[in-house]
Amino acid sequence: MGAVEEIERGAPQNTLAPEKTTTDVSKHEGFYVEFAEGDSRDPAQYTRFRKWCITLTACAFSGMTAATSASFSMGITSMIRDLRCTQFEATLASAIFLLFVAIVPLFTSSFSEEFGRKPVYLATALFVFVFHIVTATAPSIQVVVFARAMSGAFGSTGATLVGGSVADLWLPHERGFPMSAFAGASIASTGLGPVIGGFIEANPHLEWRWIQWVHAIVAGVYVLVVLFVMKETRSAVILRRLAKKKRKETGDQRYISRAEEQKQSLRTMIWISCTRPLYFLGTEPLVITFALYIFFVWGVLFCLIDSVSHTFETTYGFDVSQTATVYLSLFIGTVLGFFANMYQDVLYRKYVHRKGPEARLYIACVAALAIPTGMFIFAWTSSPRIHWVVPAVGLMIFMFAAYVAYLVVFLYLADCYGTFASSANAGQSLCRNFGGFVFPLFSQKMYNTLTYRWSNTLFGFIGVVMVPIPFVLYRYGAVLRRHSAASRKILEAEAAKS
C-alpha cells in the first residue's frame, strides 16, 4: 500500500485502492481508480449552482423535443398548400416524429454508457439542428416526412438522457424537484410550442417554414450551450478516462476503473436495452398497467392538440393567432401540475415509511378523476353560446392530469423496480410515444364520423373506465410487487443488505 500512496501523493483527489482483479490486464494485484471523498471531479460533488446549470440544460433538450413535436401541427394548413400534399400525408409527417421518439431510444440509450452523456447531447443536438434546416427547406412532403423522422430519432436520443443526468447529479432524496423540472419542461413545451407556432403561422410572410427555422435557431443556440455549460456527469465514464490517463502517465496497466472490469460490449448493452423493456411490457403487471394508461393519456393529448384549432376556429371564429392563445391553457395546466407534484412530494415523505412506493399515488388518484372531467368539459362546452374560456378550462384540467400522470409513472416505476427502473420506464415510454403516434392517424376520420364533440366524449368515457387504475395500485400495488419476478429480486437484494 505504501507504493500506491507514493504514486498518488501529488494527486490527492484520486483514491487508488489495491485490489485483486480478474481483468484482461493481469491476474496480479491491480489498482482501482475511484473518487476520493469530496473529489470535485465526482458529479455528485459538483456545486449546487453547477448541478442546476447542467440539469436545466438537459431539461431544455427535453423541452426542445416536445415543442418540435407539438408545434408542427400549427403549420399544416400552409404546408398542404405549398407542397400540394394531402391531409393524411401532413398528419403522417406530424405523427412520425413520435414513432421514432418511441422506437429509436431502445437502440441508442446505451450510447451514453460507452461515450458519456455530453458527447451524446452534443451530437444529437447537432443533428436535430441539421434536420430542422432540412425540414424548413424541403421541396416535397416526402422530404418533410424523412426529416421529421430523423428529428424524432435524434431528439429522442438526447431527451432520454435527461433522467440519467438527474440521477448522476442528485441523491435520491434530492431528485423530486429536478425531476419535476424535467417533466415540466416536456409538458409545458407541448403547450408552448403550438402558441409560438400559431403566431408564426398567422404571419403570411413566415408560415410553416419559419416554424422550422425557429426550431433550427433554437437548436443551434443549444449546441453552443452544451459546449460551454454541460459537463460529463456519468461517473463510470469519468473514472474510465482517469484510469486510461493514469495508465498512460505511469505505463502501469494495472490501473483500472471498476466500470472497465465489469464493462459489457456495446452490442450486448444495445441488445439488453432493446429486449428488456419489451420483456417488462409482456410480464410485469405494474408496467403493463401504467403503460396502457399513459398510452391512452398521451394519445388523447396529441388528438387534442390537433383538434383545438378546428374547434375554436369553427365554433368561435378564431383566427390562427387567437387559437394559439388557447394553447396557453395547456401551459397553465402544466404549472398547476408542477405545484401539485410539490405537494405530492410532501405526502410521499410523510407516508413512504408506511405505504412504500404507493405513497407516490395520492395526486395520481386526483389526476385520474381530472382526465375524464377535462375531456367532458371541453367536449360539451365548446359552443357559441358558452364563453370560449370554459372549454379552455377543460383543456387546462386535462393538461394538469397529463402532467401528473407523466411524472408519477416515472417515479412510481423507478421506486418499484430499483436497478431495473430504466427498463421499466423505457417500456412505458415506448407505449406513451406510440400512443402519440397512432391516435392522430385515426382521429381525423373519427372526428369526421362522430363529430369533435362525440369523439372527445368517447375519450372521456374511456377515461372514466381507467379512473380505478391508480386507486387499485394504491391499494394492491404491494401485492402485485410480491408476485413480480423483478420486484422479488429487488426485495431479496434489499433483505440481504439489511
Image: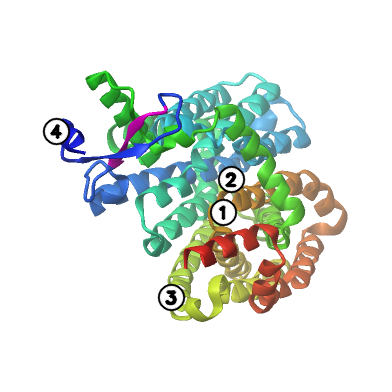
**Where in the figure is residue 438, as x and y percent of width and height?**
75, 45
What amino acid is labelled 4 in the image?
Answer: Glu
What amino acid is labelled 2 in the image?
Answer: Ala
The mark closer to the camera, 3 or 2, is 3
Residue 108 or 84: which is nearer the viewer? 108
Looking at the image, tell me whether mark 4 or mark 2 is earlier in sequence order.
4
* Magenta stretch in the rendered image: 27-34
| SS for dot 2 | helix
Q: Which residue is mark 4?
A: 6
Spatial CA distance of label 4 from label 3 is 46 Å
Q: Are marks 3 and 2 in contact (CB under 8 Å)?
A: no
Spatial CA distance of label 1 from label 2 is 28 Å
**Where in the figure is residue 465, as x and y percent of width and height?**
78, 71
Q: Are marks 4 and 1 in contact (CB under 8 Å)?
A: no
What amino acid is labelled 1 in the image?
Answer: Ala
> Against 56, is 232 above or below?
above
Q: Which residue is mark 1?
A: 421
Q: Are marks 4 and 3 in contact (CB under 8 Å)?
A: no
> Against 469, is 73 above or below?
above
Q: Main secondary structure of the magenta part?
A: strand
Q: Which residue is mark 2?
A: 70
Residue 226 or 451: which is nearer the viewer? 226
Spatial CA distance of label 4 from label 1 is 42 Å
